[in-house]
């Protein structure tokens, strides 16, 4: 292997690129799953409570007209995106804490001292 190839392999190992790629792939899948839950369960419930069948269809007609077009704000889509973001963050938080994955990278002080 040439020098640049070795440097590249060393970079991948030292920077944890493989772990980052795996984390990204899992994160994308988790995000898609949470979005499905929000779109299929939470949004219809909120839409029902607010009187709309679909949360993303909730709009505010401002009454402001310019050039023959009315300014219509789609606040339901924004609210849906915020719900998806908060639900995704909550699921990730509880999975990481529940599975104690936040402890994997931390080195015990006792282990660190005993290795010296």
Image: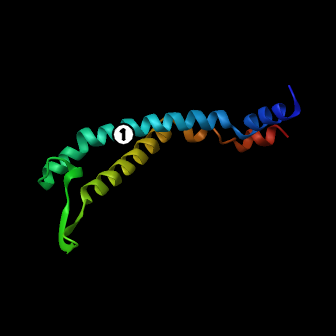
Residue at the top extreme of this rendering:
1
- Along the line of sight, the residue nearer the viewer: 75 or 40: 75
The residue positioned farthest toward the right in the image shown = 3
* Quadrant in the rendering for residue 95: top left
Tell me where residue 78 appears, x and y as whole percent: 31, 57
- The percent coordinates of residue 4 (x first, y second) are 84, 35
Q: Residue at x 20, y 74 (%)?
A: 64
Residue 77, x across and y down, in percent: 28, 54
State the SS at label 1: helix
Of 66 and 31, the residue lying toward us: 66
In this view, the residue farthest toward the left is 51
Residue in the image at 20% along x and 50% along y? 46
Location of residue 44 in the rendering, given as x and y in whole percent from the top left corner: 19, 44
- Is the residue 29 above or below the residue 72 in the image? above
Crowding near the residue tagged with mark 1, few <14, some 14–19, many ≥20 C-alpha atoms within 10 Å: many
Picture quadrant where residue 73 is located:
bottom left
In-image side of 105 versus 69 (left or right) = right
Left or right of residue 66: residue 36 = right
Residue found 40% across the figure and 46% down from its top: 90
Residue at the disc numbered 1: 34
Camera-nearest residue between 116 and 38:
38
Q: How many marks?
A: 1
Quadrant where the image shows the C terminus: top right
Q: Residue furthest front?
A: 67
Where is the N terminus found, in terms of image quarters?
A: top right
Q: Nearer the viewer, residue 15 or 93?
A: 15
Which residue is drawn at the image coordinates 74% and 41% (left, top)? 110
Q: How is the image coloured?
A: rainbow
């Amino acid at each position: 292997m040439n020098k640049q190839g070795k440097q590249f392999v060393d970079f991948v190992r030292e920077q944890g690129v493989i772990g980052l790629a795996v984390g990204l792939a899992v994160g994308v899948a988790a995000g898609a799953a949470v979005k499905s839950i929000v779109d299929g369960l939470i949004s219809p419930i909120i839409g029902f409570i607010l009187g709309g069948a679909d949360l993303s269809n909730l709009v505010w007609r401002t009454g402001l007209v310019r050039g023959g077009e009315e300014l219509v704000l789609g606040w339901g889509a924004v609210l849906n995106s915020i719900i998806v973001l908060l639900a995704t963050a909550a699921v990730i938080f509880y999975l990481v804490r529940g599975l104690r994955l936040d402890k994997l990278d931390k080195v015990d002080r006792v282990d660190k001292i005993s290795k010296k």
